[in-house]
Amino acid sequence: MSKTPQAIRGTQDIFGPDAEAFAFVVETFERVRKLYRFRRVEMPVFEKTEVFSRAIGETTDVVSKEMYSFEDRGGDSLTLRPEFTAGIARAYLSNGWQQHAPLKVATHGPLFRYERPQKGRYRQFHQIDAEIIGAAEPQADVELLAMADQLLKELGIEGVTLHLNTLGDGDSRDAWRGALVEHFRAVKNELSEDSQERLEKNPLRILDSKDRRDQRFVADAPKIDQFLSDDARAFFDALTSGLDAAGVKWTRAESLVRGLDYYRHTAFEFIPEEGSEAASKLGSQSTILGGGRYDGLMESLGGAATPAVGWAAGIERLAMLVGDRIEPNADVIVVVENDELIDRAIAAIAKIRAGGHSAELMATGSPRKRFDKAVKAGADKIVAFDMRDGTEHVRMKADDEATASLEMLLG
RNA sequence: GCGAUCGUAGCUCAGUUGGUUAGAGCGCCGGUUUGUGGUACCGGAGGUCGGGGGUUCGAGACCCCUCGAUCGCCCCA
């Protein structure tokens, strides 16, 4: 170990163009979220452990092996949030937000999961998140997806497709699950080791296994469509026709499932098209935005049955796709070519900034090189203070109009 | 959690089958040159070669452990 402390594994220090890209994602999200009238909420970064274990499901990987849980000084088991939805549901119940239903909320911030780090996968990562709580109608799903679609477009992300599926209502899902277990159990010994385990814990996940041994049996596995109740089918039909009306392109993904227990009906992911530039930038962490309907979640937290739908997207993954964001140049750079004039320059830059222009002071290092540094930094306008023949000499490098406005500003 | 690759100055990298004081470009700092200018030249700072242990007369190169990154699996955003 070296003597200086190292960052925690799976955390990142984001700086420069990467930080600009990150900020661009958040700013764009904030703008789009207002267009759709989602209200901003701020949530605690940690909750009682049971908030997540009950909401997400004890058997899920997230709860069983990826949470940062600890006992606080009062002896309570607390957990750093591994996702937003459970905490928002808890807040909805504990603050009586039912009075605002249907409630559209949005937030963003850090999440924590103890996973093996990889490109696009971190232990502290960041998401933007949008939820509609207390709305049972498919129109809520349509609005939420339209917002996601517009967000990706405004971020300039190309080559990403909405993969859409329905898991049906509770009864549909249970019947389908039973049929899948029966189907795969018959060939259990020929499945991959992972899928043999999934058969007991989470049979739906076998459907999106990447293992060739599994894929042979996935093709003719029972389809959810055979088990959909009339209501569930009507819901999905209304959703897809709403998406078409909103101009949101989608593709049916019959084997798309969600890892967390609370999902019902709608499940979706935005995934880069194979071979696209976006896909190669993301590596194996391909889902950039995912979510669905979670009508059963509130009950698992002891609340009244409350329909809800939401999505989250990884800011780091989106930032990888938005391309280089250059840190903007200063509007003005004030150069001090002679140290006697430092106070004159400070007075000038104060006026410039008070006038609403970004400005940088160049007053250190070799006086002769300061002007070159200013030119190199790429400012639109440069004001240089120098002494010529014993008198103050102010030079401006800018076009005529800018020079005039600067002279007016500086009096 | 499993498998694999990698880790040399701030950054990008070079360092022949282990052999004297570990290099380049860019960047940074200083000097000179130019003087409405992003030039050129000279000089300087900066590395216990990720960390620890071992093999050897000798290790940046080989072995073991460890930390980290990356790729695949898993998981997921």
Image: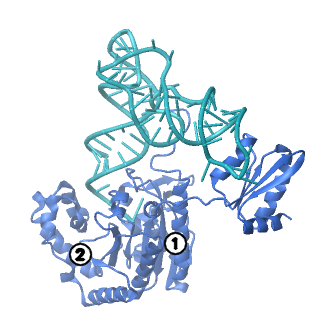
Chain colours: A blue, B cyan
Q: Which residue is labeled 2 in the image?
A: A254
To which quarter of the image does residue A44 belong?
A: bottom right
Tell me the kind of residue under disc 1.
Phe
Name the quadrant containing residue A184.
bottom left
Image vertical order of residue A76 relative to residue A94, above or below: above
Mark 1 vs mark 2, CA separation in Å: 29 Å
Horizontal arrangement in the rendering, residue A105 relative to residue B33 (left or right)? left
Relative horizontal placement of residue A339, taking residue A192 as reference (left or right): right
Residue at 50% x, 72% y is A88
**Which residue does the numbered mark 1 point to in the structure image?**
A29
* Residue A132 x, y percent position in the rendering: 46, 80
Front-lying residue, A71 or A320: A320
Whichever of callouts 1 and 2 sits on the residue coming sooner in the sequence is: 1
User: Is residue A363 left or right of A178 when viewed as pictured?
Assistant: right
Residue A186: x and y, percent?
9, 66
Please report, as a chain letter, where disc 2 is located. A
